[in-house]
């Protein structure tokens, strides 16, 4: 499994939410974690609907120790994975 770190969007505010994106697996909507994006409150909905398009999104409060900014992401899909 390849792990990719990156940034989407241009916002540089501190992230308030970690929004996880899951692809279905074995009939479960939350089957496999593919991507986590971090979002400020203003971009929380965009993270769910645009940055994680096609995935089932689940938002969590960010960890008190994270220093991520809005739009930062971690992608867990293989480069040739169609869910990517």
Image: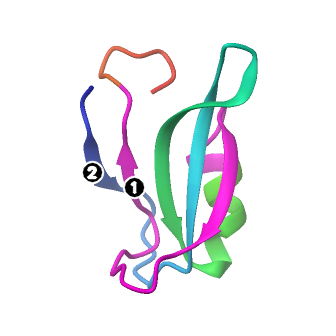
Q: Position of residue 71 (x, y in %)?
A: 45, 64
Q: Position of residue 27 (x, y in %)?
A: 75, 15
Q: Are marks 2 and 1 in contact (CB under 8 Å)?
A: yes
Task: Name above or below for residue 58 compared with residue 55.
Answer: below
In reply to whether residue 52 is colored magenta, the answer given is yes
Dot 1 corresponds to which residue?
73
Dot 2 corresponds to which residue?
5
For this rendering, which residue is in front, 6 or 30? 30
Which residues, given as a range, are shown in magenta?
50-77
CA separation in Å, label 2 and label 1: 6 Å
Q: Quadrant of residue 47?
A: bottom right
Q: Position of residue 32 (x, y in %)?
A: 55, 30
Classify residue 69 as left or right of residue 36. left
For this rendering, which residue is in front, 61 or 68? 61
Q: Residues within 10 Å of mark 2 (few under 14, many from 20)?
A: few
Of the 4 image quadrants, the one containing the C terminus is top left
For this rendering, which residue is in front, 43 or 77? 77
């Amino acid at each position: 499994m390849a792990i990719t770190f990156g940034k989407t969007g241009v916002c540089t505010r501190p992230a308030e939410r970690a929004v996880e994106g899951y692809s279905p697996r074995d009939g479960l909507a939350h089957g496999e974690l593919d991507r986590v994006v971090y979002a400020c409150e203003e971009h929380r909905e965009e993270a769910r609907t645009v940055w994680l398009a096609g995935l089932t999104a689940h938002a969590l409060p960010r960890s008190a120790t994270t220093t991520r900014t809005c739009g930062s992401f971690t992608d867990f899909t293989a480069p040739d994975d169609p869910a990517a």
